[in-house]
Amino acid sequence: MSMRMTPARRRRSVNGTIAVAISAVMLFPVYWMVGTALKPRGKILSAVPQFVPWPISLGNFQRALAKPHFGVFVRNPLAVTLSSVVLPLVIALFAAIAIARFRFAGR
């Protein structure tokens, strides 16, 4: 039995390759942010990029948590994010229930 590439298999292969490439592009900033957070303070702004942080340092987290008003800096964006996500979800839920359960003109 030969492993011939059928058009469907070729299309799946191309789609999978595109999906992996897009995922890598989308996830790289998150990887870079975590990698930068784990670098020692002196290596963060080095001229040569270091893709794998070594030695791993948690000093950046300790300094951030020790700053005054850290809780405020976390609470405010969290409140904005939750209100901009949860409120539209609740409104959309009620709209979906209304569309699914009730008969009205224009449905």
Image (cartoon, rainbow, N blue to C red):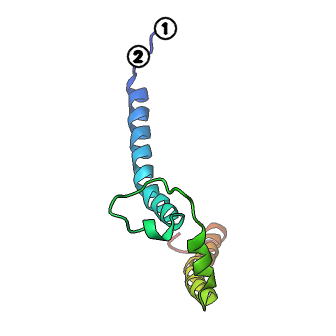
Q: Which residue is mark 2?
A: 4
Q: Position of residue 37 (x, y in %)?
A: 52, 67
Q: Which mark is residue 1?
A: 1
Q: Residues within 10 Å of mark 2 (few under 14, many from 20)?
A: few
Position of residue 6 in the picture relative to residue 67 (left or right): left
Query: Which residue corresponds to the image point at 54% horizontal and 81% vertical from the top-left?
Result: 84
Q: Position of residue 65 (x, y in %)?
A: 62, 81
Q: CA distance from mark 1 to mark 2?
A: 9 Å
Q: Quadrant of residue 2?
A: top left
Amino acid bearing label 1: Met
Q: Position of residue 72 (x, y in %)?
A: 60, 90
Question: Where 36 falls versus 88 (above or below)?
Answer: above
Question: Where 11 falls versus 44 (above or below)?
Answer: above
Q: Position of residue 68 (x, y in %)?
A: 60, 91
Amino acid bearing label 2: Arg
Position of residue 88 in the picture relative to residue 21 (left or right): right
Decide which of 91, 19 is in the foreground and name it: 19
Question: Where 56 falls versus 41 (above or below)?
Answer: above
SS class, disc 2: loop
Decide which of 1, 89 is in the foreground and name it: 1
Q: Which mark is residue 45?
A: none
